[in-house]
Image (cartoon, rainbow, N blue to C red):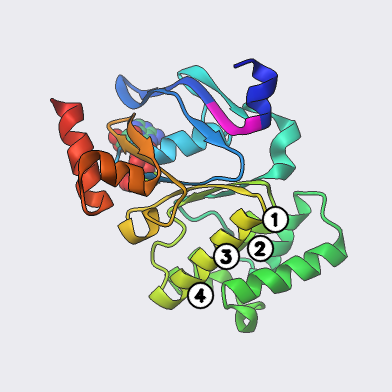
């Protein structure tokens, strides 16, 4: 496939993307091809390289070797900044600012008009169910609430390509359902979403699941493909089956 066609089709392309930390291979020559408009779920045990991969894709971490392209632009690309949203696994917001101030700060980093910001803020506060706490300092919120603010900050500029590193950890079940409705809605609007999760009930709701193990992508496909190929009744068993084959 020529590069121009690939740019049209794929939101994310990586070639032999690799990260080593003092000899430890965190991500091993990864070749990812994620089509635009896909809700992509990355699963895998602790330390399998999911966060490292995402950090390289958003340009926060320099790969040891290999390269990545987001919407046809080689990473890191300043041109893409407005089009990418990133919710880090660790705390990505300012605890000494209020919820509103955090959202405003994130929106100021992008070219969003005041009117658009007010509309987006209202919509996102509704999604994370924190309208009442708009003026509260983040340090006064519970852990799950802070997590919800972090998600809203990642989405404030209405990005086309969204990276969410464990977006629903610590979020109560009712809101988790609300988050998923929102992810599906974003996808319907043509956004590309890459998220990581340890919850298999979330992974099955993704269009495509990538299974990581020890820095490698050991399997990739729709949830039903992955289960059919392995004869597993659920994704957890499918993962174990692929992990067993990778070991063999
Ligand atoms: N800054 C760092 N320095 C050294 N090693 C690191 C660093 N960051 C990550 N690692 C190592 O790289 C590997 C991959 O870590 P990574 O955070 O990408 O895993 P993960 O799949 O996101 O795990 P989790 O599900 O726990 O979030 C691990 O072995 C980890 O210890
Ligand atoms: Mg991680």
Q: Which residue is mark 4?
A: 141
Q: Is residue 83 left or right of residue 143?
A: right
Residue 52 lies, with reference to residue 66, above or below; the image says below
Q: What residue appears at the point 65 percent right and 17 percent down from the top-left corner?
A: 3
Secondary structure category for the residue under label 3 = helix
Q: What residue appears at the point 57 percent right and 58 percent down from the top-left corner?
A: 93
Q: Which residue is mark 2?
A: 102
- For the residues marked 4 and 2, what is the alpha-carbon distance in whole angstroms? 13 Å
Contact between labelled residues 2 and 1, with CB atoms less than 8 Å apart: yes
Q: Quadrant of the C terminus?
A: top left
- For the residues marked 1 and 3, what is the alpha-carbon distance in whole angstroms? 20 Å
Q: Which residue is mark 3?
A: 182
Question: Mark 3 near ligand 2 (CB under 8 Å)?
Answer: no
Q: Main secondary structure of the magenta part?
A: strand
Q: Earlier in the sequence, mark 1 or mark 3?
A: 1
Range shown magenta: 9-13
Secondary structure category for the residue under label 2 = helix
């Amino acid at each position: 496939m020529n590069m121009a066609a690939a740019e049209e089709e794929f939101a994310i392309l990586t070639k032999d993307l690799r990260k080593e930390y003092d000899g430890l291979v965190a991500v091993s020559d990864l070749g990812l091809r994620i089509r635009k408009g896909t809700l992509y779920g990355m699963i895998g045990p602790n330390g399998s390289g999911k966060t490292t991969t995402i950090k390289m894709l958003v340009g926060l971490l320099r790969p040891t070797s290999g390269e990545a392209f987001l919407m046809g632009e080689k990473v890191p690309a300043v041109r893409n900044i407005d089009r990418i949203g990133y919710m880090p696994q660790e705390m990505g917001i300012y605890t000494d600012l209020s919820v509103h101030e955090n959202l405003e700060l994130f929106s100021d980093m992008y070219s969003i008009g005041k009117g658009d910001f007010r509309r987006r803020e209202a919509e996102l506060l509704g999604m994370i169910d924190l309208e009442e706490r708009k003026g509260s300092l983040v340090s006064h919120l519970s852990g799950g609430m802070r997590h919800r603010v972090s998600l809203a900050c990642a989405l404030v500029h209405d990005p086309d390509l969204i990276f969410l590193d464990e977006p629903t950890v610590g979020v109560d079940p009712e809101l988790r359902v609300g988050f998923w409705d929102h992810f599906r809605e974003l996808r319907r609007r043509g956004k590309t979403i890459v998220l990581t999760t340890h919850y298999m009930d979330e992974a099955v709701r993704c269009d495509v699941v990538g299974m990581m193990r020890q820095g490698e992508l050991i399997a990739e496909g729709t949830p039903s493909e992955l289960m059919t190929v392995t004869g597993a009744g659920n994704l957890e068993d499918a993962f174990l089956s692929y992990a067993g084959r990778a070991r063999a």
